[in-house]
Image: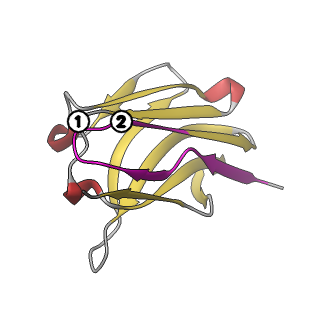
């Protein structure tokens, strides 16, 4: 059974930092972090692939750092210089390839609140 469990969310003041971690079970091809702000669609934050490539999407580059090891089924997200607009639920995602078809799996999400 494929599972993903996030940890590390919480409340932080603007300019602060948080580190999110995710541990999974499953034969993942790629692991990612997504986030969903109130009233908005879920968006990609960054990913780690089996080749070791790590990428954070442009709007968050410079403030957020992805690390992890897909073979070890772990991915982390270091968030610095947090802003109120970073508030949302952060989800860990894992992609499993079955018969050449990708299947997405999600963690339960962890709340991040940035506020003064």
Rendered position, 16 above or below 49: below
- Where residue 40 appears, x then y in whole percent? 26, 75
Where is residue 57 drawn, in percent x and y?
Answer: 24, 40
Q: Is residue 68 left or right of residue 25?
A: left
Residue at the extreme top of the image, as rendered: 52
Residue at the spot x=20%, y=49% of the render? Answer: 83
Q: Which of the pair 25/116 is nearer the observer? A: 116
From what the image shows, is residue 39 above or below residue 46? below
Let me know if residue 5 is in the magenta part: yes
Q: CA distance from mark 2 to mark 1?
A: 6 Å
Residue 87 is drawn in which quadrant?
Answer: bottom left
| Residue extent of the magenta highlight | 2-20
Q: Is residue 104 visible?
A: yes
Residue at the spot of label 1? 81
Label 2 sits on residue = 17
- Specify the quadrant of the image occupied by residue 109: bottom right
> Which quadrant of the figure contains the C terminus?
bottom left
Does any portion of residue 99 appear in the rendered image?
A: no
Tell me residue 111's x, y (percent): 48, 61
Counting from the top left corner in percent of width and height, residue 38 is at 31, 75
Mark 1 residue element: loop
Q: Quadrant of the N terminus?
A: bottom right
Label 1 environment density (alpha carbons within 10 Å; few <14, some 14–19, many ≥20): some
Q: Residue at x 22, y 39 (%)?
A: 15
**Is residue 59 in the magenta section?**
no
Q: Going by the image, does 25 lie left or right of 108?
A: right
The residue at 59%/37% (across/down) is 29
Q: Is disc 2 placed on a helix, strand or loop?
A: loop
| Residue 46 left/right relative to 58 | right
Quarter-of-image position of residue 25: top right
Cβ–Cβ under 8 Å for marks 2 and 1: yes
Sequence-first tag of 2 and 1:
2
């Amino acid at each position: 059974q494929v599972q993903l469990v996030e940890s590390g969310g919480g409340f932080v003041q603007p300019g602060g930092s948080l580190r999110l971690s995710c541990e999974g079970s499953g034969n993942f091809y790629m692991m990612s972090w997504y986030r969903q702000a109130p009233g908005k669609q879920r968006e990609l934050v960054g990913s780690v692939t089996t080749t070791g490539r790590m990428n954070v999407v442009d709007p968050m580059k410079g403030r957020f750092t992805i690390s992890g090891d897909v073979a070890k089924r772990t991915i982390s997200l270091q968030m610095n210089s947090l802003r109120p607009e970073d508030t949302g639920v952060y989800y860990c995602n894992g992609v499993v390839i079955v018969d050449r078809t990708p299947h997405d799996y999600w963690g339960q999400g962890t709340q991040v609140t940035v506020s003064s």
